[in-house]
Image (cartoon, rainbow, N blue to C red):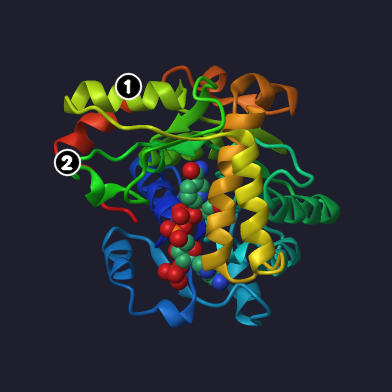
Amino acid sequence: MSKPRILVVGATGRTGGTIVDSLLEDGKTHVEALIRPASNANPTILKLKDRGVKIHFGEIKDDPQLASILAGIDTVISAIGPGAQLEQIPLADAAKKADVKRFVPCAFITVCPPGGVMWIRDQKEQIYQHFRKLGLSYKLIDVGYWYQASFPTLSSGRVDYASLLVPNMTISGDKNIKTALTDLRDIGPYVARCMTDSRTLNKCVFCYGELLSQDGLFAKMEELSGEKIEREFVSPDQLLALCDAIKASFKYNLSDMKQAMTVIGLEYSYSMFVRGDNSPEYAKYLGYLDARDLYPDFVPRSFEAFARELVDGKAARIF
Ligand SMILES: NC(=O)c1ccc[n+]([C@@H]2O[C@H](COP(=O)([O-])OP(=O)(O)OC[C@H]3O[C@@H](n4cnc5c(N)ncnc54)[C@H](OP(=O)(O)O)[C@@H]3O)[C@@H](O)[C@H]2O)c1
């Protein structure tokens, strides 16, 4: 029997990259990638080709070529960047028309309810509503917050090279609320397992590596580096006021991704460290399956293992 064909959208990105790595390692499927023509000079494409990934060039919106690219594809996995979420609507339409068996939309964020808590969640929910309306089979996978975006920086500057923000010594909301965190590199192995698992069909799955509070993250970084971190505190009220002021400053129009990114970051903090949404218990309440129950064989990386690489100067520069 021939192997199922999986088409990854966003294969040159961080999430898409880990998914492609794991699917190739798994070897149970043919891995293909849809790349927008404007990105044809991206050096990652050559690396993907060298590893046996079939490359298709095409737009995901209104491209007549899309139907022929999707013909015969069993599963589409989208790991598209945060600024292009709604472009998955025409992709889902085309997948439905082409009789694609399963659609894995770009979820891959924290657990959070829809309805105004996080703008990025609500963008993604529009896609979920759309493929449910189409009756398109799906698998929806959320992953907690990346270790790679969670650590505080150190006064010596030795982890600045890998940090999203410099400096980053702020504790927002409640320092003791534990939240689900994941090493970016563990997303792929979880996704690959979900792909061949019929228990995950038309279900939401929650994967994570470790539950840690901000206090726990700071303490671990202090322990491994031998440095004291001067914490700055932002209260829940200050966090909300800051978020509102930023949104108001650009008239609540989040179409500019640079502006939206600030809001996305603050809303993540509000959801995780004020509301406490991003937990396995709340995920179960919202109807998610827990990947730890499904795949007890997989041992995700610990935050400590990641932080050791970081402090030793060996973490990847992903931002
Ligand atoms: N859980 C977390 O902590 C966390 C952290 C960050 C992101 N995320 C989520 O993960 C998802 C992926 O983010 P990422 O940071 O991994 O993405 P990324 O590294 O920025 O990569 C985005 C990918 O999407 C492709 N892309 C962007 N716009 C496109 C378009 N209009 N048409 C076709 N392809 C397009 C890019 O292709 P090109 O090569 O053509 O640019 C690239 O392959 C996001 O939706 C975000 O919400 C979660």
Which residue lies at the image location 60% right of the left edge and 42% below the top edge?
239
Q: Nearer the viewer, mark 1 or mark 2?
A: 2
> Is 143 placed left or right of 251 in the picture?
left
Can residue 3 be spotted in the picture? no
Image location of residue 200, percent across then percent down: 64, 33
Q: Secondary structure at mark 2?
A: loop
Q: Nearer the viewer, residue 274 or 308?
A: 274
Q: How many other residues sit within 10 Å of disc 1, few (<14), some (14-19) or many (≥20)?
A: some
Task: From the viewer's side, name the closer residue of 227 and 141.
Answer: 227
Q: Is residue 64 above or below residue 246?
A: below
Dot 1: what SS?
helix
- Give the label on residue 156, or none: 2
Residue type, label 1: Ala
Q: Is residue 306 left or right of residue 191?
A: left
Q: Quarter of the image containing the C terminus?
A: bottom left
Q: Is residue 278 above or below residue 31?
A: above
Which residue corresponds to the image point at 19% horizontal and 28% vertical from the top-left? 227
List the residue tagged with mark 1.
219
Percent of width and height locating residue 158: 17, 43
**Which callout, 1 or 2, points at the residue further toward the start of the chain?**
2
Q: Is residue 70 visible?
A: yes
